[in-house]
Image: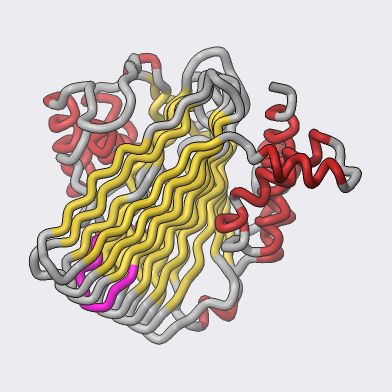
Amino acid sequence: MLVLEIKGLNKENIISISNHKGEDSWVKDYRLEAYKQFESMSDKLPFGPDFKLDFNKITYYKSQDDTLRNDWNQVLKPVKEELENLGVLESEQHMGGMGVQYESEVIYHKMLDELESKHVIFTSIEDALKNHKDIALKYFGKIVSFKENKYAALNSSVFSGGSFIYIPPHTKLDRPLQSYFRINTKDMGQFERSLIIVDDDSEVHYIEGCTAPTYTTDSLHAAVVEIFIGKNAKCRYTTIQNWSDNVNNLVTKRAIVDEGGTMQWIDGNIGSKINMKYPACILKGDNSVGECISIAVASNNQIQDTGAKMIHLGKNTRSHIIAKSIGRSGGNASYRGLVSIEENATNSKSSIKCDTILLDKLSKSDTIPTNICKNESSIIEHEATVSKLDEDKLFYLMSRGIDEEKAIELSLIGFIEEFTEELPLEYAVELNNLLKNNFQKMCNI
């Protein structure tokens, strides 16, 4: 049964979303203030490729079932069968906890009993704002302001779903937590808001996957992710983005890292029409570390505008960016990044490595870095290459009895090995199968 569907963006619709969720007055006020900011901002972003959206054609909220459940058997049968076909249910056995968002609402959340006994919290953002308010209010909206850009303001106006994770001090999770996001409706917008707090001396690996069927009109995914890393804590955030090629994907992801902490972004970008995503680390504490390892595969009519941002504030901080891109059939796979080592961030170091393979003359890749070093004791290293497939390597493989299509596939998998080796085994297998399907298409250029 359809609970609620809201199309078009205006003050009344935002109030309807908030009322339907039964939110506190401060949440509704936050949404309305963000919407006022949204209306005042230019459609043209200060970064990324130019494009236009008709915001009134988007469905901003849709739910078939807005009850958060912890039993798959209680999920609506058509939705459950769809998720089973996508392999979501099967992957749960490898995780410490699983969350699933379908359209605008998180419909399923479950965590191992042993994690609950450790006082780990893994739930939806709506549940956290109601039932874990003392923690959520301390962090919500603190490192991603709705005043930053139009899509951060849009998310803050209509956010729905997303994950809330709190890892108490001195707690290390042996198995990852996972969330899965599914858009299943034409002209749909998905605007999840995720908040992760990893307290001192703790550790977590969070994995998210996302898919959508293909429609002839565009959909929009505009998420916000905020992560807080305590002293000597560690967070790894892995994304396998496989949106259909009618989804515009504009995501703001940012982490702030305290003394001795580590933030790792493992970011895979296969799908979407336009993908603009630049995971960021604010290295606030001394000896903190930020890493981003990403891949982007751009085919015909796709723009993969991806990269990373590293802001060094503390002394002896380290950041490392590896960006691998593949373009075919006129796809655009570009790196856009920012590294800034501030004046007080003495003895800090950042290294950036951007490698692209273009499989035809129609494809395109740009490297658009902004590297700033404000003190004399720190170092920024940047390396970028754009090339074709190595013909000598292909010849060698084919001389060993491997056909050309398989040789190209092996070469491309080797090219992105630095990314795949960072994934859990079951995800590496899934990603390789996904990429093989793409590579087989690439072999037919």
Q: Which SS does the magenta portion mostly show?
A: loop
Task: Look at 59% across and 26% down and name the residue there.
Answer: 328
Residue 416: x %, y % from top left: 59, 50
Query: Magenta part of the protein: which range?
Result: 282-289
Task: Look at 25% across and 32% down and name the residue there.
Answer: 47
Q: Could you say which is closer to the camera, residue 132 or residue 140?
A: 140
Q: Quadrant of the N terminus?
A: top right
Residue 172 appears anywhere in the view: yes
Residue 109: x %, y % from top left: 55, 58
Q: Could you say which is closer to the camera, residue 84 or residue 352?
A: 352
Task: Look at 15% across and 40% down and name the residue there.
Answer: 147
How many numbered callouts?
0
Residue 1 appears anywhere in the view: no
Residue 146: x %, y % from top left: 19, 41
Q: Could you say which is closer to the camera, residue 374 or residue 111?
A: 374
Residue 87 covered by magenta stretch: no
Colour option used: secondary structure
Q: Quadrant of the C terminus?
A: top right
| Residue 315 horizontal side relative to residue 55, left or right | left
The furthest residue to the bottom: 170
Task: Look at 62% across and 27% down and name the residue there.
Answer: 213
| Residue 145 horizontal side relative to residue 388, left or right | left
Q: Could you say which is closer to the camera, residue 12 or residue 47?
A: 47
Residue 319: x %, y % from top left: 33, 64
The furthest residue to the right: 401
Quarter of the image where one finds residue 166? bottom left
